[in-house]
Each structure stands twice: as C-alpha cells, then as structure tokens.
Image (cartoon, helix red, strand yellow):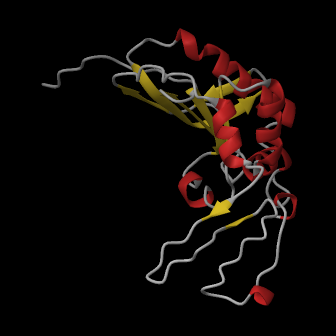
Amino acid sequence: MGENVLGWLVAEFVPYDSRPGGEVLVGLRRTAEFGPVLVLGVGGVHAELLAPSLAPAVLRAGGGEDERERALRASPALGLLADGWRGGPAAARRGELASFAHSVLAAAPGLPVEVAEFEANPVVFTEKGPVALDALVRLGTVPSPAPPRPEGPIDRLLHPRSLAVRMSLPNPCRNFTTASGSESLAKELWPPASISRRSASGL
C-alpha cells in the first residue's frame, strides 16, 4: 500500500478497573542531592488532577527502612490505592505496593546510564503481578552525586539551643535580647514592663 512499516508492536490485553484508585503511577528520577528518588501515587488520566489532594509517597534510595515505611503510611494516595474508592476494588494491598516500591528502587542502579528518569502510568496489579500499561523514559545526563551534607551543623541551625536578635534602626538600641534568658532590654524602643524573658525551651 505504499506504507513504510518499520516494525510491529504486539501487546497483551490486560483487563482492569480504570476508576480512580485502580491505577498506580510510579516514577523514578536520578538526582544529585538524594540519588534515585521514587514517586508512588494514583495513576491513570486522573493523576495530575488528584495529586494536589492525594499526595503520592516519595521515597529515596538512601533512606532507611523506617523512613520509607513512614512515607508510605503518610501518603493519602496509598490509602486510596489500598482501600479503593467508594466501594470500588483496591489497586493492590499495602504490602504489595510497598514491595513494588522497594523493588523499583532496588533496580535503579541497574538502569542504563543514559536514563535520567522514567514514569510508568498506569501500572495495574494482576494475579501475575504488576504490569505497566504505558511508560515514558527521558534520556539525559545524570547529575553527579553531590558532596555529603554536614548533618551536624545543619541540625544545629534547625534546632538552636538559643537565639539572639540584634536590631539596626535609625534610633539604635543599646542592647539586644537573647532567648537564653538575658535581661538586656531594648530600652530605647519599649518600656521594660512590656518585654518578657523567654528561655530557649519555651520557644
């Protein structure tokens, strides 16, 4: 007929429930800061619409088992996928979803180096296991791993034992106050009676 046929694709027909909660989205991206990061949420044509109210679970390859379990339990999307939507069938049991997420993360190091990220949507769970009905791969340069973060100094910044506030105004204060209990008062601006002392533990 004049057509230049380059090839054929033969795919199995997989019956499944396409209502919200019956389809799973899984995505994996390689990042410089955290290594491979996985997203597991509600899939199908409603994925973008439901994502703001049903946040997916986000897991990183470097996270511990407890961290991953907390992320899976805290995700509203996983609740819908495991419990179903208004009497509809669930996409999979929680244990199956968790095992699937761990398997994808474990396989991340074996991906070709050109794969920067991929997404499978929808993924449906059958008697034989999860099946990806559609997938997209983005090729690109995988970022080099970032240097280790100084967790100790960062933790001290996020959880300080004390806090000092110094003001610079046209009529400068002679003193500054600290949250650790200093009695210094900004006498130029406020009367002492209006300023209360607070310890760091009370902040």
* Along the line of sight, the residue nearer the viewer: 130 or 9: 130
Question: Does residue 24 show up?
Answer: no
Question: Which of the image's four quarters has the N terminus?
Answer: top left
- Left or right: 103 with respect to 88? left
Image quadrant where residue 138 sits: top left
Using the image, determine if residue 11 lies above or below residue 120.
above
Percent x, y of residue 147? 50, 22
Percent x, y of residue 109? 56, 12
* Along the line of sight, the residue nearer the viewer: 129 or 27: 27
* Along the line of sight, the residue nearer the viewer: 55 or 142: 142
Image quadrant where residue 131 sits: top right
Using the image, determine if residue 181 lies above or below residue 132.
below
Question: Does residue 38 show up?
Answer: yes
Percent x, y of residue 90? 81, 45
Using the image, determine if residue 169 lies above or below residue 70.
below
- Left or right: 171 with respect to 165? left
Query: What count of labels does the image hold?
Result: 0
Percent x, y of residue 89? 82, 47
Question: Which of the image's four quarters has the C terminus?
Answer: bottom right
* Along the line of sight, the residue nearer the viewer: 119 or 10: 119
